[in-house]
Amino acid sequence: MERQERYIRFDWAVRKILRQKANFGVLESFLAILLNEKVTIIGFLENENNRQMIADEIHRVNIKALNSRGENIIVEIQNTRKVHYLEHILRGAVEPIAGFTELGGIFSDVKKVYFINILYFDLGWGTDYLYHGQNNFIGVHTGDRLEVGAMEKDAVIHKLPAEVFPEYFLIGLEQFNKVAVTPLEEWIEYLKTGCIRPDTKVPGLEEARQILRYYNMTPEERRAYDEHLSVIMIQNDVLDTARLEGRMEGIEERKQEGREKESLRIARNMKAEGLDVALISKITGLTSEQIASL
């Protein structure tokens, strides 16, 4: 019987296979489709946050690239939920700028940063799978977009803040639930499911079908990969359980608050009718002090 082809999940492929320079073309094709321009992979960010512990590798992978204008592109693959996530991506986008200025660079040479997040978890309550954010200054009374005048090569040019400030792309794989039609959708389909169509002509995915086959790995590599998937599933299950228990506790707390409010309402009415405090306490369960304060 013919063996069904399996492909390596993207987050593992990036850490183990696609980080090899010979395979950068796969990542570059994906980013070019997303951003609609040529992109060049520079390497992988090995900062202190990446190296702090082996377990962190399970959660996050960072890639650095440049577009045709020399602007920075940071790609982060995030496997598990993170507390204060918006603050986290803000820091990730401004760190390259802060590092540049600390090394003595001048502000006119600061390059814009694109921060792309590939998320293997449900980020919030949005209904789309791809979100794009950028900064603009809007007139409070006029509604116009501010353009800032700046000197460049002895000429005054106009710049929108969105041309300078970091730009964000959030790709929520859990929200993707449609039939893939466009090249970008085929890529998102692979990122979410690990499946690549046998007849795909999408740039990057054609190459991925050849180099990301599960059975191309050695038995030892396959065991490590399978353990990686198991760890992620266990961690997400723990987090989902904790979140469910938190919701149940919250529901019970709201029910209790509702019961207390109802008891106070009843006690207030009984007190207004001149009923005895002891009787009110017996019926509502409130203390005499609580009833006296009504």
Image (tube, rainbow, N blue to C red):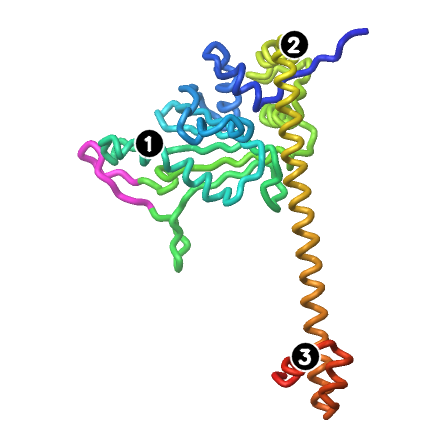
Q: Residue at x 50, y 24 (%)?
A: 31
Quadrant holding the C terminus: bottom right
Q: Residue at x 27, y 34 (%)?
A: 101
Q: Is residue 193 left or right of residue 100?
A: right
User: Residues at badges 3 and 1 in contact (C-beta under 8 Å)?
Assistant: no
> Earlier along the polypeptide chain: callout 1 or callout 2?
1
Asked whether 201 or 291 is in front, the reply is: 291
Q: Main secondary structure of the magenta part?
A: strand
**Residue at the bottom extreme?**
274
The image shows residue 254, relative to residue 12, as above or below, that is: below
Q: Position of residue 175 (x, y in %)?
A: 64, 37
Asked whether 290 or 123 is in front, the reply is: 290
Q: Is residue 222 left or right of residue 145?
A: right
The label nearer to you, 3 versus 2, is: 3
The label nearer to you, 3 versus 1, is: 3
Q: Which residue is mark 2?
A: 219
Number of the label disc, if any, that sits on residue 34: none
Magenta stretch bounds = 147-158
> Earlier along the polypeptide chain: callout 3 or callout 2?
2
The verdict on residue 136 being magenta is: no
Q: Residue at x 54, y 31 (%)?
A: 59
Asked whether 207 or 285 is in front, the reply is: 285
Disc 3 residue crowd, few under 14, some 14–19, many 20+, Cα 10 Å = few
The image shows residue 216, relative to residue 89, as above or below, that is: above
Q: Which residue is mark 3?
A: 287
The label nearer to you, 1 versus 2, is: 2
Q: Which residue is mark 1?
A: 111
